[in-house]
Amino acid sequence: MRDKYILAVDDSRTNLQIIRGILEGTYTLMLAISGETALKYIDRRRPDLILLDLMMPGMSGRETYAEIRKKPGCGEIPVIFLTASRDEDLEVECLNMGATDFIAKPIVAEILERRIERALMPADIRKEMSGELKEKSAEIERLSLQAVGAIAQALEARDPMTRGHSLRVAECSRAIAEEMDFSPETVEQIYQTAMLHDVGKIGIPDSILKKEGRLTPEEYKSIKEHTTIGANILGAISSIGYLEDGARYHHERYDGNGYPRGLRGREIPVVGRIIAVADVFDALVSRRYYKTRMDREAARKEILSGAGTQFDPEIVSVFIRLLDIGKIPDYSGDGDPDPADADSGGRPGDQGSDRGRHERRQK
Ligand SMILES: [Fe+2]
């Protein structure tokens, strides 16, 4: 690397010394205390890379950059801006100007070294690496989804009564999201999120999940925890940041009386509001340990009556429209629609889909 020549430009001698301390011995260095000096050095020898302080008295980093680019043969030299500011707009502006990179001060040795190594790579290799990185992260996302999908399957295998519930809720949520004109990428994320909304039930004992009678207050409290348990499981998958909201918020209610946080209206992430409708409808038209199946017309009425209280009225109207034009599949001929949702479709005391069970049982 000694053959690579780096020009560092900064009005602070301390910063220049720091840069020298990090890079000396690895690269050939030239240190300039101002933009004007830097331009003179460049006339003498063309650097392979320039570290350029953005905020300098006299000729600013921006002006120096513009002058460098005007020099013959200097249009493609990688330039990394250095600045104390953490302003994102500034960062975007630098990158838009054509800067290769942007490093915030104080300078961290490892970051400086890695960024320089990367900037010095031939452009085609850099491009190839970023393509590979994209592929790798897509692969990680696929594998992570497979892993959590396996947990969801394990959950449904545990309880024949809820088999298929997650898939139906996911498909219904996807239909609603499409109708709401979300981008295809967001629709897919909502689908995946809905598929895993009840994953936290893995942490709830069978004696509660499969209980046929009313839940005691303690049991009900325990079942409510599936939202937080699920969110914690999914939140641990750092490669996919969007999954946990479905698990956490699908039992929130529009009027603020849901759980776990008691959020109200649009405070509830939209994915939670969508899944809430899909989840309750599926639970209503499914058989559960504690209730028989409700017919679709009655379930339609039940969902409509919850608009503005339990559910987001806008999402209810989208759902009802889809239902009325036959876009919500009728699974009532299937075997045992899922009770995996011990909490969906009305469990004692549930504020969400479990609520019905509670109320109906009380009658
Ligand atoms: Fe649930």
Image (cartoon, rainbow, N blue to C red):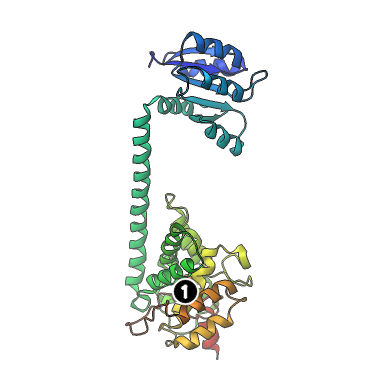
- Residue 341 occupies which quadrant of the picture? bottom left
Q: Looking at the image, is 210 positioned above or below residue 243?
A: below
Q: Nearer the viewer, residue 10 or 21?
A: 10
Q: Looking at the image, is 127 positioned above or below residue 122?
A: below
Q: Is residue 314 left or right of residue 208?
A: right
Quarter holding the N terminus is top left
Q: Nearer the viewer, residue 192 or 252?
A: 192
- Residue 220's x, y, as percent? 52, 75
- Residue 182's x, y, as percent? 49, 62
State the residue lying farthest toward the top: 44
Q: Looking at the image, is 156 positioned above or below residue 14?
A: below
Q: Amino acid at mark 1?
A: Asp
Residue visible at 35% across and 62% down in the picture: 149
The reply to whether residue 348 is in sight is yes
- The residue pinned by badge 1 equals 279
Residue visible at 37% across and 59% down in the picture: 148
Ligand 1 within 8 Å of the CB at mark 1: yes
Q: Is residue 121 left or right of residue 110?
A: left
